[in-house]
Amino acid sequence: MPDLAHDSPKPKVIPGAKSDWELVIGLEVHAQVASNAKLFSGASTLFGAEPNSNVAFVDAAMPGMLPVINEFCVAQAVRTGLGLKAQINLTSAFDRKNYFYPDLPQGYQISQLYHPIVGEGEVIVDMGPGIARRVRIERIHLEQDAGKSIHDLDPTMSFVDLNRTGVALMEIVSRPDIRGPEEAAAYVAKLRQIMRYLGTCDGNMQNGNLRADVNVSVCRPGDYERYQATGDHSVLGTRCEIKNMNSLRFIQQAIDYEARRQIAILEDGGRIEQETRLYDPDKGETRSMRSKEEAHDYRYFPCPDLLPLEIEQAWVDDIAASMPELPDAKKARFVEGYGVTEYDAGVLTAEAENAAFFEEAAKGRDGKQAANWVINELFGRLNKEGKTIGETPVSARQLGGVLDLLASGEITGKMAKDLFEILWTEGGDPAEVAAARGMKQVTDTAAIEKALDDLIAANPEQVEKAKVNAKLAGWFTGQVLKATGGKANPAVVNQMVAQKLGL
Ligand code: ADP
Ligand code: MG
């Protein structure tokens, strides 16, 4: 299988008034574990349920209630770690992160500060054919989500919904290896894609399934290379953290704004204060939320209600054995096995279901032609009608049937499109529909020749004109196609016209 060779993209350079600047970005992505039950209780995680209907006693922090770890959630974190080629820690532990908020009835969040379940890994972020950024993963830890405070339902009161309280999150922490807004968005998209392949997170950003805290700093050209060579963070600029972003577009806008804000301060001789900021999409700006808090502000300590989490290598191996083919491998295989371009392979493998559809339609056929049909006709049509691949009226088998009729020369490209249209709206077996509708390319050269001979005999002056100006021979081709009801192969007709007129 080919390793798609990649060059690193150049970092985004932002010209300031006094010098050039570069961006340095690190992301902390909170991915909701795809699990029906919460991390430490059996309560449902169903989105959109009646407020406060999915709350176990432990989620509501009733006195004396104890958390019980959900093995399935642990397995999902391990699976995600394996998908990011990361180290799996057989021993990890839970800590209490203490803070008060009305939607956090325990008064602390159970998280994993000191001993996360997953250690170092990496993600390859595609930035165009042949260009990719390698982003190192520092760690993934498991933690509980908080509930939801609702401030805009009543002028005098706030409401609290504890349905989300205790839902399992994987916090995926990157190294500061991301060098521009587009890369940040592409990184989140790639994580989402990998987790959707793995089935460990639905990645529904609108529902808050996937949210990112975006750390942004700026530095002078050369500083980042020095950090890479030495591992010394202090050569980088001071960062600000933009909290809780759940839109790829807003992530990019917020980074752009933040870069300009920081550069303006620095060029003015000021200093960046490390702080937490919020992005306001209506105003297109970030605002200070609070100054940076340190680990000790949270009085972290090992959670006394939970034993250290010990997992066995054999269990990890079982999970590893059940891993699906991941996007990078699938993409490389499509390029090699079906001869499609890297770009097309990227489109075809965006979602596992799309890739499976393509493979079923392409197997044993011309891969490039199958890719064109799947991307242009099928995906194009699905997009236009706002349908997902699961809702396609034309199955992979049906599309394969159309491709077979095309490949054998039984129908023309134009007929194939008409046939696809009929299958889309009315369904049916491609070969039967084509036969019933009289869609059959005339490959019988005798029939074509007869039509052409008649034309030539009836139009001597057109023949003379075409002999002087070869472009006018197209008239004959058009007439023959017309006479055969569009069923003749244009290339065959063209060739015959040229031959008969001696062109
Ligand atoms: P802390 O322990 O203070 O939370 P971390 O080292 O864990 O800091 O980093 C948190 C996030 O901030 C990580 O995703 C990391 O990549 C990112 N980060 C660290 N330093 C910088 C920097 N100078 N610029 C941008 N992002 C950074
Ligand atoms: Mg940190």
Image (cartoon, rainbow, N blue to C red):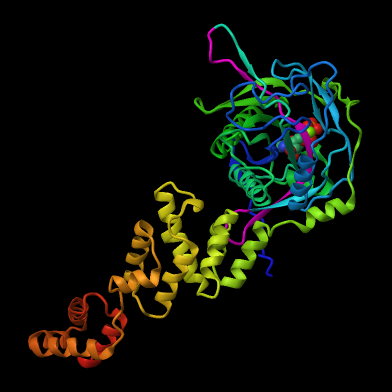
Q: Residue at x 73, y 42 (%)?
A: 176
Q: Residue at x 89, y 52 (%)?
A: 313
In the rendered image, the quadrant that contains the C terminus is: bottom left
Q: Residue at x 20, y 77 (%)?
A: 478
485, above or below 494, in the image: above
Say whether residue 132 is magenta.
Answer: yes
Pick the front one: 24 or 225: 24
Q: Which residues are magenta?
A: 126-155
440, above or below 215, in the image: below
In the rendered image, the quadrant that contains the N terminus is: bottom right
Q: Quadrant of ligand 2?
A: top right
Residue 270 in view, yes or no? no
Whether residue 136 sits left or right of residue 503 in the image: it is: right
Instruction: State the image quarter where residue 52 is shown.
Output: top right
419, above or below 215, in the image: below
Pick the front one: 134 or 168: 168
Q: x%, y% of residue 24?
A: 69, 40
Q: x%, y% of residue 151?
A: 58, 15
Instruction: State the image quarter where residue 296 is shown.
Output: top right
Pick the front one: 156 or 161: 161
Whether residue 199 sits left or right of residue 99 in the image: it is: left
Residue 142 in view, yes or no? yes
Q: x%, y% of residue 314?
A: 88, 54
Say whether residue 143 is magenta.
Answer: yes
Q: x%, y% of residue 54?
A: 67, 26
Q: Residue at x 74, y 38 (%)?
A: 170
